[in-house]
Image (cartoon, helix red, strand yellow):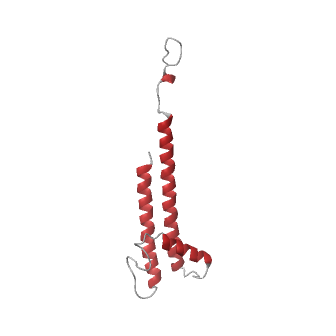
Amino acid sequence: MVENIEGIDAAATEPGPSSHVLAVARWRDGAARVLWVICATLAMVLAAAAFTFALEANADNDLVKLVRDLANTFDLGFFDLDNPVKEFQGKNDLVKTALFNYGIAAVVYLVIGRLLERIIRP
Protein backbone atom coordinates (compact mmCIF):
# COMPACT_ATOMS: atom_id res chain seq x y z
CA MET A 1 0.00 0.00 0.00
CA VAL A 2 1.35 3.42 -0.96
CA GLU A 3 0.99 6.18 1.62
CA ASN A 4 1.55 9.84 1.09
CA ILE A 5 2.90 12.22 3.71
CA GLU A 6 -0.44 12.76 5.47
CA GLY A 7 -0.95 9.01 5.89
CA ILE A 8 -3.84 8.81 3.42
CA ASP A 9 -4.00 5.87 1.10
CA ALA A 10 -2.83 7.22 -2.26
CA ALA A 11 -4.55 4.42 -4.19
CA ALA A 12 -7.93 5.47 -2.78
CA THR A 13 -7.56 8.99 -4.17
CA GLU A 14 -6.57 7.94 -7.70
CA PRO A 15 -9.20 8.84 -10.26
CA GLY A 16 -11.39 5.99 -11.54
CA PRO A 17 -14.25 5.91 -13.97
CA SER A 18 -16.45 8.90 -13.41
CA SER A 19 -20.03 8.50 -12.34
CA HIS A 20 -21.11 10.05 -15.65
CA VAL A 21 -19.35 7.33 -17.64
CA LEU A 22 -20.90 4.64 -15.47
CA ALA A 23 -24.36 6.21 -15.80
CA VAL A 24 -24.06 6.28 -19.60
CA ALA A 25 -22.88 2.66 -19.65
CA ARG A 26 -25.80 1.65 -17.42
CA TRP A 27 -28.25 3.51 -19.66
CA ARG A 28 -26.82 1.91 -22.81
CA ASP A 29 -27.02 -1.52 -21.21
CA GLY A 30 -30.66 -0.96 -20.26
CA ALA A 31 -31.55 0.39 -23.71
CA ALA A 32 -29.89 -2.61 -25.38
CA ARG A 33 -31.86 -5.00 -23.17
CA VAL A 34 -35.14 -3.22 -23.87
CA LEU A 35 -34.57 -3.30 -27.65
CA TRP A 36 -33.68 -6.99 -27.54
CA VAL A 37 -36.80 -7.82 -25.51
CA ILE A 38 -39.00 -5.84 -27.93
CA CYS A 39 -37.55 -7.59 -30.99
CA ALA A 40 -37.75 -11.02 -29.36
CA THR A 41 -41.37 -10.39 -28.33
CA LEU A 42 -42.31 -9.36 -31.87
CA ALA A 43 -40.63 -12.49 -33.20
CA MET A 44 -42.64 -14.60 -30.76
CA VAL A 45 -45.88 -12.91 -31.85
CA LEU A 46 -45.09 -13.72 -35.48
CA ALA A 47 -44.23 -17.31 -34.59
CA ALA A 48 -47.45 -17.67 -32.58
CA ALA A 49 -49.46 -16.33 -35.50
CA ALA A 50 -47.81 -18.81 -37.86
CA PHE A 51 -48.68 -21.63 -35.47
CA THR A 52 -52.32 -20.53 -35.34
CA PHE A 53 -52.43 -21.25 -39.06
CA ALA A 54 -50.47 -24.50 -38.73
CA LEU A 55 -52.67 -25.78 -35.91
CA GLU A 56 -55.82 -24.64 -37.71
CA ALA A 57 -56.89 -22.56 -34.72
CA ASN A 58 -60.43 -21.23 -34.60
CA ALA A 59 -60.29 -17.95 -36.52
CA ASP A 60 -63.35 -16.69 -34.60
CA ASN A 61 -61.52 -16.93 -31.25
CA ASP A 62 -60.64 -13.48 -29.89
CA LEU A 63 -57.11 -14.50 -28.85
CA VAL A 64 -56.39 -15.97 -32.27
CA LYS A 65 -57.73 -12.81 -33.90
CA LEU A 66 -55.53 -10.67 -31.65
CA VAL A 67 -52.37 -12.67 -32.41
CA ARG A 68 -53.06 -12.64 -36.15
CA ASP A 69 -53.84 -8.90 -36.12
CA LEU A 70 -50.62 -8.17 -34.22
CA ALA A 71 -48.65 -10.31 -36.65
CA ASN A 72 -50.27 -8.52 -39.58
CA THR A 73 -49.28 -5.19 -38.00
CA PHE A 74 -45.66 -6.16 -37.32
CA ASP A 75 -44.90 -8.28 -40.40
CA LEU A 76 -42.68 -5.49 -41.74
CA GLY A 77 -45.01 -5.02 -44.71
CA PHE A 78 -42.67 -7.17 -46.75
CA PHE A 79 -43.81 -10.51 -45.28
CA ASP A 80 -47.53 -9.74 -45.40
CA LEU A 81 -49.86 -12.66 -46.13
CA ASP A 82 -51.88 -10.52 -48.55
CA ASN A 83 -48.79 -9.91 -50.67
CA PRO A 84 -46.22 -12.47 -49.44
CA VAL A 85 -42.60 -12.89 -50.37
CA LYS A 86 -43.36 -16.48 -51.33
CA GLU A 87 -46.87 -17.77 -51.90
CA PHE A 88 -47.45 -21.50 -51.95
CA GLN A 89 -50.09 -23.23 -54.08
CA GLY A 90 -51.96 -26.47 -53.55
CA LYS A 91 -52.84 -28.34 -50.40
CA ASN A 92 -52.37 -26.33 -47.17
CA ASP A 93 -51.18 -23.31 -49.15
CA LEU A 94 -52.22 -20.78 -46.47
CA VAL A 95 -50.42 -22.72 -43.74
CA LYS A 96 -47.21 -23.00 -45.76
CA THR A 97 -47.36 -19.34 -46.78
CA ALA A 98 -47.91 -18.20 -43.18
CA LEU A 99 -45.13 -20.42 -41.79
CA PHE A 100 -42.66 -19.30 -44.43
CA ASN A 101 -43.37 -15.56 -44.40
CA TYR A 102 -43.98 -15.10 -40.67
CA GLY A 103 -41.02 -17.36 -39.93
CA ILE A 104 -38.68 -15.26 -42.06
CA ALA A 105 -40.04 -12.06 -40.50
CA ALA A 106 -39.42 -13.51 -37.01
CA VAL A 107 -35.83 -14.35 -37.94
CA VAL A 108 -35.34 -10.83 -39.31
CA TYR A 109 -36.56 -9.35 -36.01
CA LEU A 110 -34.19 -11.59 -34.04
CA VAL A 111 -31.21 -10.66 -36.22
CA ILE A 112 -32.00 -6.94 -36.09
CA GLY A 113 -32.54 -7.11 -32.33
CA ARG A 114 -29.25 -8.88 -31.74
CA LEU A 115 -27.35 -6.47 -33.98
CA LEU A 116 -28.86 -3.43 -32.27
CA GLU A 117 -28.10 -4.92 -28.87
CA ARG A 118 -24.45 -5.50 -29.80
CA ILE A 119 -24.10 -1.98 -31.21
CA ILE A 120 -25.72 -0.20 -28.28
CA ARG A 121 -24.33 -2.24 -25.37
CA PRO A 122 -21.07 -0.77 -24.02
Q: As rendered, which of 120 and 10 lies closer to the eye? A: 120
Q: Relative to 122, say whether 116 is above or below.
A: below
Which x, y percent locates residue 5? 50, 11
Q: Relative to 26, say whether 92 is above or below.
A: below
Which x, y percent locates residue 105? 43, 69
Residue extending farthest top: 5
Is residue 85 shown left or right of residue 3?
left
Q: Relative to 118, say whether 107 is above or below.
A: below
Residue extending farthest bottom: 90
Labels in figure, total:
0
Q: Relative to 97, say whether 40 is above or below.
A: above
Which x, y percent locates residue 112? 42, 60
Which x, y percent locates residue 101? 42, 74
Residue visible at 47% across and 81% down in the picture: 95
Residue visible at 61% across and 79% down in the picture: 61
Residue visible at 44% across and 88% down in the picture: 91
Quadrant where the C terminus is found in the figure: top left
Residue extending farthest left: 85
Residue visible at 43% across and 57% down in the picture: 114
